[in-house]
Image (cartoon, coloured by chain):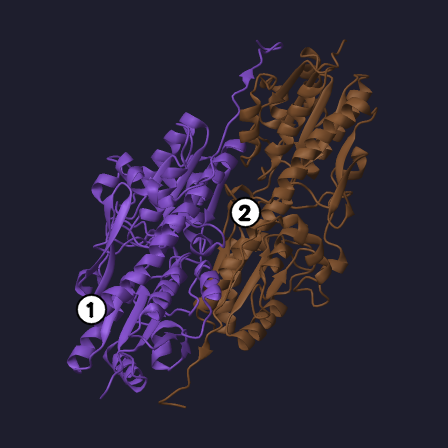
Chain colours: A purple, B brown
Amino acid sequence: MSTSPGKILVAQGGGPTAVINQSLVGVVQEARRHPGIARVYGARHGVRGIVNEDFVDLTQETDANLELVAATPASALGSTRDKPDLAYCQKIFTALKAHGIGHFFYIGGNDSSDTVRIVADEAAKANYPLRCIHIPKTIDNDLVGNDHTPGFPSAARFVVQAFAGANLDNAALPGVYVAVVMGRHAGFLTAASALAKKYPDDGPHLIYLPERTFVLDSFLADVKAVQERHGRCVIAVSEGIHDASGEAIAAQLSSQVERDAHGNVQLSGTGALADLLCEQIKSRLGIKRVRGDTFGYVQRSFLGCVSEVDQREAREVGERAVQFAMWGERNGSVAIQRCGDYAVNYALVPLETVAGKTRVMDDAFISDSGNDVTDAFRHYLRPLLGSGLPQAHRLRATPVAKVLKP
Amino acid sequence: MSTSPGKILVAQGGGPTAVINQSLVGVVQEARRHPGIARVYGARHGVRGIVNEDFVDLTQETDANLELVAATPASALGSTRDKPDLAYCQKIFTALKAHGIGHFFYIGGNDSSDTVRIVADEAAKANYPLRCIHIPKTIDNDLVGNDHTPGFPSAARFVVQAFAGANLDNAALPGVYVAVVMGRHAGFLTAASALAKKYPDDGPHLIYLPERTFVLDSFLADVKAVQERHGRCVIAVSEGIHDASGEAIAAQLSSQVERDAHGNVQLSGTGALADLLCEQIKSRLGIKRVRGDTFGYVQRSFLGCVSEVDQREAREVGERAVQFAMWGERNGSVAIQRCGDYAVNYALVPLETVAGKTRVMDDAFISDSGNDVTDAFRHYLRPLLGSGLPQAHRLRATPVAKVLKP
């Protein structure tokens, strides 16, 4: 059993983001700079592509095209939701050995980091000298050991721009507006909507996170109070909101619940949750104009909404992954650590720290009322959104005195 | 009964757009330049604000703030869905007379132009010398006599960027993706999704417009064929698709149909149509990964997605409206006419030409198959989208020969 340290493999797993290709290109370019690396392979569609030997030779890519691909959202190599078990991992080894791969870089979220951990364990058991590095990525921002994760800032920027616009639309034609945002267990992306507020009466007026139990009666009371105060109400709701027993509100509605390979209920790609909440507001509060949107896949894939901070960091975690692999002696997961206001460092943390675990929002980020965020969260998020964020402006025109009904 | 030619009133009606405030600012700035105009009033929330004498004095606005408001989406004065009848119009006259208004500028779509027509008719009947100008605005692009309408190009740009991203996401994690786009009778905005295609196998692979009868069985056969060819399928569907009898597919699903003051069924603000189509694809084609998004209000309000061509033209229709009013002798509707590739002129057409009528897509813009657009449509739309449209790029990396299963 011989391996070549000069041949590396990179793959992308889980949901695509606006900047995951930055990390891919970071790996490829740093690897190509390293004299010890002769070949850079990419596996198509994640671990499934490894098992199927569906490899492309990224050593044969122009730098010009790599830069263009880096600026393109979604996973250029393709992705997968497969979660390898022991048999699956044995097939991965067989393929890696056959191609003489010595380093495996997997860009993904907590499910993908668990995949890397299993592959690394199996490699160790099989006494196969494989260096395994997980590179963080997820719009959910739910990896432990990270200040934040690449992909989250750009998705958050989309959410901010979407709510800033929806608030203006709702102010022009008043009513209740509910928008459902991605995030199964962690509310970071939904909470980002708070950064859309500029004036005190701007929406979102209410924010519901999966970190807090969702109680329909309390929700309706909150909406009623805002409607009475402002004559309108803009609401941000996480797709992952759940009742006291932990059951997702979205799952309670659907007779046919779809689950993925990880046992997760499908929350995205359906407007059912927004429609249910709107129906409750209409029927129980008697409000006529109630509209619901579900941001869906657009929030993670929209071409052209990106934070340049996110782009830079996503590139760096890819570069650093190769540097850790070539100069270090350990497997691990690259983690972003905030070391200034605003500045970051990158560390290699044990795979066990990240794998399969879920980070949620700190209590300090959530208001005591449970339906808003704190200034601590705003301060945390603002630098991640990048520069040039569009701003909303209002007329200041003075009212004209009434003549007929003064 | 005396009126002052030196006092004008401007208002905004119907659904907000990304550039409707450009038209507002065009009116205000051009009016303030005109020595014959002493006061520029704005009515809050359209005709409702006139009836309620809810006026602001736009003569007292800084140019700096007007420029910032112009770049802000949605209706800065507020909007309304009210459609005035005779009694309503008499109240409008009473308020206009009481304030000595001589010119009425109303920025809106075909419902709003009908409002302007009724107000102008009532003014004529009452022998009240009121100059009434309709300024075009609608993301639906459905005003007759116009090459296109302000607001449509920016919304189209959103749709292009959204589909370009959704196509990449779908290519990374293959399956069927359905996105529902606004457009009750006219399919222009849904058709814009075609401009997201770059490579021959890119989505959207299928486009369904309200200009063609929607037949569920044909739809499913189309999806099946694309899925078999590409292993995935991206679909653009207009919210206004209907059966042979003209009944909206969305309306067939809902037990409680909501109608607005114009008798229109509510199509937006619900995910029901996307969910129904996804359910049909899952159950009847046996495809597992099927996801549906409804772009909803985000497509018309997203802060920061705008065509600079649209911005410029929206500003100009406002400026020209004042010029037509001050130098012409007629009521009318400002219309955009294409006079070059690409260049436009503005004309004042009779209100009767535009009011209450709906323009739909030319047959020459729709493919014979009925589920795609033609190059004539692409050529029509491309210059409207503006510059700097983000592009998607692919890896060109060469495949690696298989070792285990060559």
Residue matched to label 2? B299
> Where is residue B166 shown, x and y percent of the image?
49, 60
Look at label 1 and name its amino acid.
Answer: Asn
Vertical relation: B112 (above or below) B387: above
Pointer 1: residues within 10 angstroms few (<14), some, or many (20+)? Answer: many
**Cα separation between marks 2 and 1:** 44 Å
Indicate the quadrant where residue A205 lies: top left
Instruction: Give the letter of the chain under mark 2.
Output: B
Residue A138 seen: no
Q: Quadrant of the C terminus of chain B?
A: bottom left
* Quarter holding residue B316: top right
Please name the residue that numbered disc 1 is placed on. Answer: A331
Identify residue type, mark 2: Gln
Judged from this view, the residue extending furthest toward the right is B329
Instruction: Give x and y (percent) for residue B310.
Output: 64, 42
Relative depth, front residue between B401 and A400 = B401
Residue A22 in sight: yes
Tell which tag, 2 or 1, sits nearer the viewer. 1
The secondary structure type at the circle numbered 2 is: helix
Q: Secondary structure at mark 1?
A: loop
Task: In the rendered view, tell whether residue A245 sits above or below residue A266.
Answer: above
**Image spot of residue B210 (x, y percent):** 67, 55
Q: Is residue B184 above or below residue B234?
A: above
**Mark linked to residue A142:** none
Side (left or right) of B378 relative to A280: right
Q: Position of residue B68 (x, y in %)?
A: 53, 30
Q: Is residue B358 left or right of residue A337?
A: right
Viewer-proximal residue, A151 or B395? B395
Provide the chain ID for the residue under circle 1. Answer: A
Q: Residues within 10 Å of mark 2 (few under 14, many from 20)?
A: many
Point 43% across, 61% down: residue: A70
